[in-house]
Image (cartoon, rainbow, N blue to C red):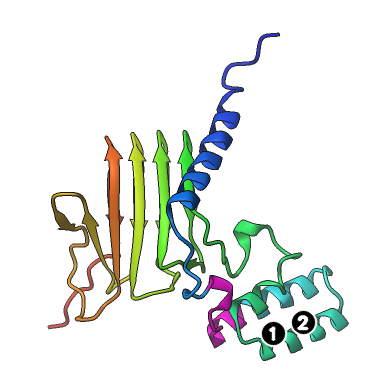
Amino acid sequence: MNERPGAWLPRLQEVGERLAEEWISARRPARPDTPQPQELRASDDDRERVAQVLQDAHADGRITLEELEERLGTLYSARTLGDLAHLTEDLLPADEQPLRLDGRPVSAFFKQEQRGGRWVVPAELDVTAMFGTTKLDLRDAILQNRRIVINATLVFGGLEIHVPEDLEVIRVTKDKTVRLTKQPTEPGAPVVEVRTTNFAGDVKVKEPPRRKRRR
């Protein structure tokens, strides 16, 4: 029986992503000393993001007033990001959650994959792009460390990083280190170190517009 053109592509993407995760897990030892994203402390700003989702859910009838009051009570006593994330899991799809705590590798096989919004960037993140593009938006992200390491495997693929002000991005290969951000940063500013293993792959950094100096 003949398959329609392109029917093989979703299966190829799924197999590629599964192999990438297995390979990454096998080569990286566990780091029990590093806190998981859900264990990080919540800020007042994070609480307000979640509170807005709960209030919207009550306004359109998805939760009752009693449920709203119960969840808000839990919200304002929560200490960690994981405590907050549980409050909205049944209200929005995963890609629309006010907090995203998924620290898994980001893989794009013959497609575009992105991660953005309010998400926790783990101390070390693996990215794979094969005939595809991975986009990481760090403008509203929570950095687990002051120095983030991105292990990027690029095969005819690309990695695009959107950064906020005062965050430095450097690319490290076997023979050299190159600064990818053009704007100056303050001493001690966070650094994203991109370690690349690539074949015809590219890394691009998108910076905010340069502020005009006052005269």
The disc labelled 2 sits on which kind of residue?
Arg
Which part of the image, by quadrant, shows the N terminus? top right
The part of the image, by quadrant, that contains residue 172 is bottom left
Crowding at dot 2, Cα within 10 Å, few <14 / some 14-19 / many 20+, comes out as some
The part of the image, by quadrant, that contains residue 144 is bottom left
Q: Is residue 145 magenta?
A: no
Of all residues shown, which one is farthest toward the top? 1
The part of the image, by quadrant, that contains residue 211 is bottom left
Residue of label 1: 75
Give x and y (percent) for residue 13: 54, 34
Which part of the image, by quadrant, shows the C terminus? bottom left
- Look at the picture and state if 8 lies above or below 79: above
Q: Is residue 127 visible?
A: yes
Q: Secondary structure at mark 1?
A: helix
Give x and y (percent) for residue 116: 48, 60
State left or right for residue 110 relative to residue 56: left
Number of numbered discs present? Answer: 2
Verify CB contact (< 8 Å) between mark 1 and mark 2.
yes
Q: Secondary structure at mark 2?
A: helix
The disc labelled 1 sits on which kind of residue?
Leu
For the magenta stretch, what is the residue range?
36-49
Q: Is residue 44 magenta?
A: yes
- Look at the picture and state if 126 lies above or below 52: above
Q: Residue at x 71, y 70 (%)?
A: 88
Nearest to the observer: residue 31 or residue 104: 31
State left or right for residue 65 relative to residue 146: right
Q: Residue at x 22, y 68 (%)?
A: 210
Residue of label 2: 71
Q: Is residue 137 visible?
A: no
Nearest to the observer: residue 155 or residue 213: 155
State left or right for residue 133 relative to residue 118: left
Give x and y (percent) for residue 128: 41, 45
